[in-house]
Amino acid sequence: MGRGQSPKATNITMIWIEFLICSALLTYFAYNLGKEGVILSRRTGMSEGLVGMFFLAIATSFPEIVTGCAAVFSFGKIGLGYGDIAGSIIVNLMILVGLDYFLGRGRILARVSRVNRLTGVFVVVLLVMVLASTLARRAGYGGFVFKGMGAEGILVGVFYIASLEFIRRKSTPDDTPLENAARSEPFWEIWAKFVFFLAIVMVLGFWMAKVGDKIVNSTPLSETFTGTLLLGFATSLPEIIVSFAALKAASADMAVGNILGSNLLDICIVPILDVLTGSPILGALAPGQVAATGIALLLSIIAVAGMLHRRDTARRINFDTGLIFVVGLVGFVLLYFVG
């Protein structure tokens, strides 16, 4: 311990170091998980948009799933668990401004496929369901509950499965290979690597939830702010890296598909949290978490509007992605005070 440094200050410093180490490891292993997911998806002949929306989304969203569930079930921190979900959605959408810039001249949201436009619309519909159900439960309207899962949780799960099937039917196969996607390993070996990285990410996700619990207990930061910004950003690092890697491989559609597919899957963590808590989690959200849901919905609506507006430009940063970034930034400032 340095001279003049209190034990409490040393402890807080060690917590932040632990947070950085866990974030780095989570990013590395989730990125490798995503690479194996791309190879698996290519072997199945999926379309480019569906690859990003399904395999990449599952791989890069796994940190949110594990971290959110561990925060709620193991540490009893609803603000951390749900905040991680909402924060990850916000951070994922804010990534679009970087993708827009590095794409070069033109609008990245104008170059997405019909598959990704559909995914964006489904994300908005699910967030409307979640926000409306939250406000209804806060107003005292309970609703149906089955084995701890609220009616809204069941509806979200059913809608997610139906949307996947609908998007699968609308997609078309694409044989364009991604970088490192055409490897010659046996199929079982690729699956083995995928499962191995999945297990490592699961352990790291639990560790991240534990670090978040330490931050809340040792600093003035609230559960909501820690969950939405810190955990949301840390668990979104895989999406950031995978999306930029897809853009570098000349696949703007897959880069956006990874973000939108991850957001769609993140919302579907809500029914799992219902089961883990034994009651509808949306009825236990604090005002800060409700506000985070509203911010995520607003950003998603802006993104969908940008995708539906097909006119291109010659700018590197465009109005739609720039607005998403600014609104997201202001939202995090507001969440700091509301939390």
Image (spheres, helix red, strand yellow):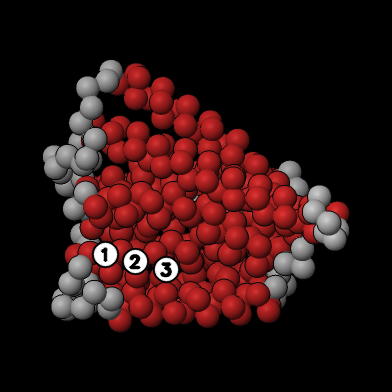
* Residue found at x 64% / y 41%: 206
Location of residue 137 in the rendering, given as x and y in whole percent from the top left corner: 67, 69
Outermost residue, front side: 3
Give the residue at x 54% y 54%. Answer: 234
Residue 84: x, y in percent? 59, 58
Disc nearer the start of the sequence (3/1): 3
Q: Is residue 2 above or below residue 194?
A: below
The disc labelled 2 sits on which kind of residue?
Gly
Closer to us: 45 or 255: 255
Tell which of 237 and 128 is nearer to you.
237
| SS for callout 1 | helix
Q: Secondary structure at mark 2?
A: helix
In the figure, is residue 187 to the left or right of 68? Answer: left
* Image mark for residue 94: 3
What's under tag 1, amino acid-wise? Phe
Q: Residue at x 59, y 78 (%)?
A: 333
Residue for badge 2:
98
- In x, y percent, where is residue 37? 35, 36
Quote the CA–CA distance across marks 3 and 1.
14 Å
Q: Amino acid at mark 3?
A: Met
Is residue 255 shown above or below 39?
below
Image quadrant assignment for residue 36: top left
